Amino acid sequence: MAKRCDWANSSPAMQQYHDEEWCRPEHNQQKLFELLCLETYQAGLSWQTVINKRAAFQQDFHEFKIERVARMTSADVDQLMTDSRIIRNRRKLEATVNNAQVIHEWSAQADFSRWLWQFVGDQPIRHAVTTTADIPATTDLAQHISREMKKLGFKFVGPTTVYSFLQAAGLVNDHLLSCDWAPENQ
């Protein structure tokens, strides 16, 4: 039987996310955008709730294609507010569109993935954690990246959200040492 991080055993969807995505280095700009968006939706909610609504978010946000999301209007957000399949928080929905616009406008000059990965020297940070309680809610790095993202115009990117995003995108690897997916056990 596979040994996973404690939080990942609550459902098959959580297990799949843990096994196939969480803490795996991601460099694809569109995928990074999706992970950032999902982390903004998690703020104040459980990750299980977000995972359960992920397919609807993907459909409503055009598979998180940055250029298409960047063109969405307030009328589109109004329409999203009627979709019970997603988390209907206007500020979070507007932040998704805003953040797509920031990345889209910025990508003419720079690549979001390269910009993000330079904060960790292009190598994931490995925390040697033995219990879920050892995993921090945020770090100095997440606080720094949060400030830099806000300067660029990103919304809903507080330090806790950014830290969860860094984990999701594999810039930080917080698999428990006992987890079969920890780098030491691969």
Image (tube, helix red, strand yellow):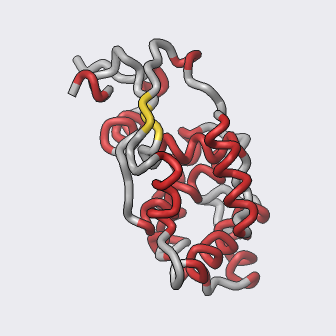
Residue at image position (42%, 62%) is 31
Percent position of residue 176, x then y: 41, 20
Q: Going 71% across and 75% down the picture, which residue do you hit?
A: 77
Which of 176/68 is in front?
Answer: 176
Q: Residue at x 37, y 17 (%)?
A: 177
Observer-nearest residue: 96 or 88?
96
Which of the 4 quarters of the picture holds residue 175?
A: top left
* Residue 130 horizontal/vertical position (percent): 45, 13
Task: Check the image and report above or below for 64 versus 160.
Answer: below
Task: State which quarter of the image contains the C terminus.
Answer: top left
Locate the N terminus and report the quarter of the image it occupies. top left
The reply, left or right, for residue 133 in relation to residue 78 is left
Residue furthest to the front in view is 121
Above/below status of 103 relative to 28? below
Would you say 21 lies left or right of 43 here?
A: left
| Viewer-nearest residue: 15 or 25 | 25
Which residue appears at 67% of the width and 36% of the height?
A: 140
